[in-house]
Structures are given as C-alpha cells and as structure tokens.
Image (spheres, rainbow, N blue to C red):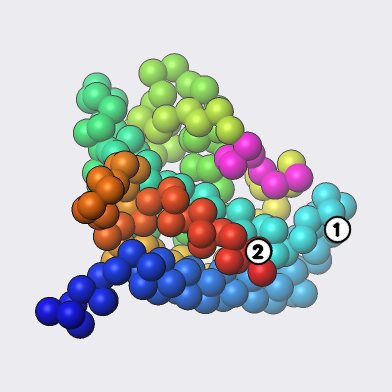
Amino acid sequence: LENIEEAFKIEKVTEEFFDKYKNHFIDLKEELEELVKKDQKIKKEFAYQNIHIVNFAKRIMSQLVFLYFIQKKGWLGVSKNKFWGSGPRNFMRKLFEKDIANYDNFFNDILEPLFYEGLAIKRENDFYSKLNCKIPFLNGGLFEPLKNYDWKETDILLDNEVFKNILDTFDLYNFTVREDEPLEKEVAVDPEMLGHVFEKLLD
C-alpha cells in the first residue's frame, strides 16, 4: 500500500510528467534543427522573422498541452448543431488517426491550420469546414504564429512520429482544470502542475 501511495503522489507524478515532457521537447527541437539545416526556405523564414528553434519547439508543446485541457472539456470537434461540451474527449488522437481529416504531414496539414485558422479566427457559428466541426475561437497569443511567420507558404514537414510519441504520452494522463480539494488531490495534470513543469523547463 505504501508503494502504491508513493507512486501516486502529486510530486512524483509532476516529476514524471516533466521528464517525459522535456524529452519530447528535446526530440521536437532536434527534429526542427535538422529541418532548418536541410530546408533553405525554412531557414530563410526563421532568420527573417528572428525565430529561435527552442522557442518554436516550446510554443508547439504549449499549444498541444493546452488543447489537451480543451478536449477534456469537450470543446473540440463539436458537431455543427451540437452544444459545447459534446466533443470527443480524444479529439487529438482522432485527428492523428485520420478519423476527422486526411493528411500527409500532421503538423503542416493539420496542426498549423487548426492553430492559426481554426482556433485563431472568429467564424460564423464557430464551424471550421476544414475539419467539419465546431472549433472555439480562442482570443489569445498562444494561437498566433510565432513572430508572425508565414505558415501558409512555409512547409514545416516535421516527422509524424514525433507527434505520435507526444500524444502517446499525453494520453496517459488526466488533464483537468478542476480545483483540488485540500485533503483529496486528484492525480492529474492541472494548471498548477503545468506551471511547475514550465518553470523547470526554463532551466
């Protein structure tokens, strides 16, 4: 019993999540570095906009983890005539598995349009035709292109496997915005825990 209690301590889960998050961040950063070396168009765009690869990788990770909170509330992939909260709680997985839309490159064909059109532009009835579902308009800087880079004309073909690994890890955790009771803390990824993760990542 003591071993089980120890395994599920909030501090232990936070440390475990951070280690996995950090490793995925490093993989993503290294994948971006290789792309920039090989692709002159990306290299030129990043240089012109003064985009640092580390910051670009951090932004993608932050965008993905934020969407895990949103999907948990059922706010992604809502059918056209349905209410907010009725979307699939595994929307990101369904996106990756091509259950919602087909693609060749997950980041270039799906994630960038979702980030910089679907979530960033106000549409009538919030319906996003590319994914054939309602996507909420989020009026915040997280879903604006970093340094206003030209995402439509710059094909950033990150390996799909990098995102499969990230989603595989995120799917293991319960993302919640529920306020914890003082005596019964839910073992979950919540905003407070994420704050600790981001603080450690700064180091």
Q: Could you say which is closer to the camera, residue 195 or residue 143?
A: 195
- Look at label 2 and name its amino acid: Leu
What residue is shown at x 41% (from left), y 24% (from top)? 126
**27 up-or-down from 101: above or below:** below
Query: Which residue is identified by label 2?
Result: 202
Q: Split into 4 quadrants, where in the image is the N terminus?
A: bottom left
Q: Position of residue 202 (x, y in %)?
A: 65, 63
Q: Split into 4 quadrants, where in the image is the C terminus?
A: bottom right
Local SS, label 2: helix
In the picture, measured across the screen, residue 58 lies left or right of residue 119, that is right
**14 up-or-down from 182: above or below:** below
Marks 2 and 1, the one that precedes in the sequence: 1
What residue is shown at x 36% (from left), y 56% (from top)? 189
The residue most toward the front is 183
Examine the structure image and report whether residue 143 is included in the region drawn in magenta: yes
What residue is shown at x 39% (from left), y 18% (from top)? 125
Q: Position of residue 118 (x, y in %)?
A: 49, 35
Q: Give the range drawn in magenta.
A: 141-147
Local SS, label 1: helix
Label 2: how many residues lie within 10 Å, few (<14), some (14-19) or many (20+)? few
Q: Where is residue 35 in the image (x, y as percent from the top left)?
A: 69, 71
Residue 162: in sight, yes or no? no
Q: Do the residues labelled 2 and 1 touch (CB within 8 Å)?
A: no
